[in-house]
Amino acid sequence: MASIGLSIVQGSGIGPTLYIVMKSDLHITSCINVIIKFADDTTLLVPENTDVGLDVEFIHVRKWAESNRLTLNTGKTKEIVFRRPQVKCFHMPHATDSIEQVNCCKLLGVYFQSSLKMDSHLQYILSQCARRMYILTLLRSQGMPIMQLPTVAYSLIIARILYALPAWGGFISAEHKNKLNAFLKRIKSYGYIDHTNNH
């Protein structure tokens, strides 16, 4: 019996499915806590009032990984404590084990802040889309027909803005909503979005 020293190639079609199957027996120890598994990302949600703390749940996950010969990437593992904005009395719990405690973290392409605001995420999106506008400018200067630019704009910019919008759209400040509206008006004025398009 020979040991296999290689894993599934990253980016393969069957890789995510095999990993989901492998993680199917990873469960939390308390019914109050929540575990969310998506491909190779695992997220633990532990409320303030629980019978099993985050440190115990994390040890459980670490033991599961060891028994299944998986290595946790602790460098990418972050802990974030969500709290109401401008709360009068708040006690920050100690960080779990050697995990870094952060005020903002990225989960599946969305930046979450400990204050329950999503301004950091919108700022990240706007900076991304501003850079992508250069591609549209380059395409137009290279002779792409004006009628085709909206298709590229929707795939590069509008689709990026709409990604996971229900998860963060209702949590941005009025100031950042104005920034988003100003950005959309700007790309319309450049002709990158067709006014007759009903997307």
Image: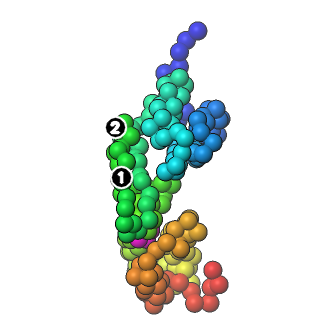
- Return the disc, 2 or 1, that comes first in the chain's sequence: 1
* Image x and y of residue 120, in percent: 39, 67
Task: Please tell me whether residue 66 is drawn above or below residue 82 in the rendered image.
Answer: above
Q: Residue 24 colored magenta?
A: no
Q: Residue furthest front?
A: 89
Q: Is residue 187 visible?
A: no
Determine the secondary structure under disc 1.
loop
Picture quarter with the N terminus? top right
Left or right position of 99 against 170: left
Residue sitting nearer the eye, 85 or 20: 85
Which residue is drawn at the image coordinates 35% and 44% (left, top)?
A: 94
The colour scheme used here is rainbow
Q: Residues within 10 Å of mark 2 (few under 14, many from 20)?
A: few
Mark 2: amino acid? Ser
* Image x and y of residue 169, in percent: 53, 72
Q: Is residue 42 visible?
A: yes
Residue labelled with disc 1: 92
Residue sitting nearer the eye, 46 or 61: 46
Nearer mark to the viewer, of 2 and 1: 1
Which residue is drawn at the image coordinates 37% and 48% (left, top)?
A: 93
Residue sitting nearer the eye, 127 or 111: 111
Which residue is drawn at the image coordinates 49% and 51% (left, top)?
A: 48
Task: Please tell me whether residue 192 is drawn above or below residue 44 in the rendered image.
Answer: below
Determine the secondary structure under disc 2.
loop
- Tell me the magenta residue range: 118-122
Residue labelled with disc 2: 98
Which residue is drawn at the image coordinates 50% and 27% (left, top)?
A: 63
Q: Residue 120 colored magenta?
A: yes
* Image x and y of residue 152, in percent: 53, 73
Task: Please tell me whether residue 175 is drawn above or below residue 47 in the rendered image.
Answer: below
